[in-house]
């Protein structure tokens, strides 16, 4: 699933740089939700095979998420110091909002709930972030880190869900998915409700748990070779983006299609060391990509005025290729920096690195 994970991260990247729609692959919102399914699968796997104590599971989740996250936060702060008015950019908020933002930035807890808060009439209120008089969501050092807040909430419940009988998990899934459908059909089908609200996203994690149990109990043979998996994913990626640019298809049906593709890869796709290594890039890529392309645009705006040669680097195809390359290089750097931490994580579990 390594290629699937990095392609989902690239889909989010493409959505954020706002390049032509036919190149956006699976779409940012869809990609985030498929990530949740994959997360549910992997968490079910490692809780089943790796940890004798739940405390070790939580310790490894912390070691997985936070080191790379904090490194990127530091780089974001360095960028603000060099290129922006630091106090105006990050601290020009009311005390109440700043307190919540500080907690979210330092712990990730509540980072997703910033999308459901707004500042109206000199106070905090519950409501879509887009209607806020002050853009509270912009307090996040890493804007896309809201999804990590959703992930952390799931981690808190994961040991409980993974101990339940399959029949009960299915019942919970049906109830929660039903609530999501009711919400969507009654007007809660817009951002942030469409893919950021944890109760509506929990069925995606649970789906991942169920896929793990199907793969384990049914002893399904992974008959799709790595080459076949790559052909399926690359074809789906480019075909999906092109079709979405030509047709208007409800996101529900987009998601159904992508769930079927992802479930096929999860259940029947083979893996190898190279594919696992590719997958390791997905998390640092996801966390760092906004910093990379925002820094690229900032540098380009400064250099454009000094040398006409840099105008060529502002052309969209060149920009996208360079930003992708730079983000991959930053991701590789982050992987190397946290390598000692990964060794510590290996000691806390009894399976290979690729599984957690």
Image (cartoon, rainbow, N blue to C red):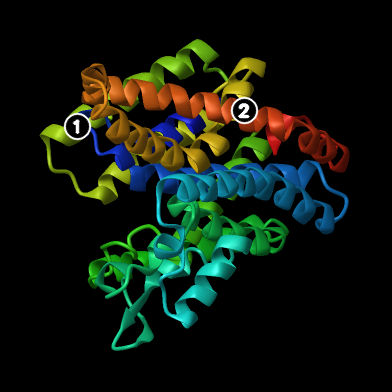
Please provide percent x and percent y for residue 209.
60, 49
Residue 264 appears left or right of 29: right
Nearer to us in this view, 309 or 2 = 309
Q: For the C terminus, which image quadrant?
A: top right
Please provide percent x and percent y for residue 237.
33, 26
Residue 158 appears left or right of 125: right
State the residue lying farthest toward the front: 306
228 shown above or below 88: above
Nearer to us in this view, 145 or 264 = 145
Mark 2 crowd level (few <14, some 14–19, many ≥20, 10 Å Cα) = few
Query: Is residue 152 something one can see in this rendering?
Result: yes
| Residue position marked by numbered label 1 in the rendering | 20
- Point 67% across, 37% down: residue: 216
Please provide percent x and percent y for residue 188.
28, 69
Between circles 2 and 1, the one closer to the viewer is: 2
- Point 53% across, 33% down: residue: 282
Q: Quadrant of residue 13?
A: top left
The total number of labels drawn is: 2
- Point 50% across, 33% down: residue: 5
Distance (Cα) linking label 2 and label 1: 29 Å
Residue 124 appears left or right of 96: left
| Residue position marked by numbered label 2 in the rendering | 333
Which badge, 2 or 1, is on the more N-terminal residue?
Answer: 1
Please provide percent x and percent y for residue 142.
48, 51
| Badge 2 element | helix
Query: Is residue 176 something one can see in this rendering?
Result: no
Nearer to us in this view, 72 or 111 = 72
């Amino acid at each position: 699933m390594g290629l699937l994970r990095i392609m989902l991260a690239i889909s989010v990247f493409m959505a954020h740089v706002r390049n032509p729609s036919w190149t956006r692959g699976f779409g940012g919102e869809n990609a985030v939700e498929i990530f949740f399914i994959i997360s549910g699968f992997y968490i079910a796997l490692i809780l089943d095979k790796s940890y004798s104590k739940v405390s070790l599971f939580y310790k490894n989740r912390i070691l997985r998420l936070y080191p790379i996250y904090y490194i990127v936060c530091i780089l974001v702060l360095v960028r603000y110091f060099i290129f922006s008015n630091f106090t105006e950019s990050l601290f020009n908020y009311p005390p109440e909002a700043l307190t919540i933002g500080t907690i979210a930035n330092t712990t990730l807890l509540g980072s997703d709930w910033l999308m459901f808060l707004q500042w109206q009439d000199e106070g905090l209120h519950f409501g879509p972030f887009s209607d806020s008089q002050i853009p509270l969501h912009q307090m996040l050092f890493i804007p896309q880190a809201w999804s990590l807040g959703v992930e952390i909430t799931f981690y808190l419940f994961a040991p409980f869900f993974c101990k339940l009988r399959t029949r009960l998990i299915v019942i919970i899934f049906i109830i929660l998915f039903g609530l999501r459908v009711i919400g969507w059909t009654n007007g809660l089908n817009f951002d942030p409700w469409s893919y950021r609200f944890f109760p509506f996203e929990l069925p995606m994690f649970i789906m991942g748990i169920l896929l793990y149990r199907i793969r384990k109990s049914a002893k399904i043979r992974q008959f799709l070779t790595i080459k076949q998996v790559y052909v399926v994913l690359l074809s789906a990626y480019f075909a999906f983006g092109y079709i979405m640019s030509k047709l208007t298809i409800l996101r529900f049906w987009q998601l159904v299609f992508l769930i079927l593709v992802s479930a096929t890869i999860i259940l029947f796709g083979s893996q190898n060391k190279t594919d696992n290594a590719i997958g390791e890039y997905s998390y640092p890529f996801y966390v760092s990509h906004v910093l990379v392309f925002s820094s690229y645009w900032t540098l380009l705006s400064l250099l454009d005025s000094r040398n006409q040669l840099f105008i060529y680097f502002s052309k969209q195809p060149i920009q996208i290729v360079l930003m992708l390359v730079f983000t991959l290089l930053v991701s590789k750097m982050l992987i190397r920096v946290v390598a000692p931490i990964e060794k510590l994580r290996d000691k806390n579990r009894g399976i290979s690195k690729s599984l957690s």
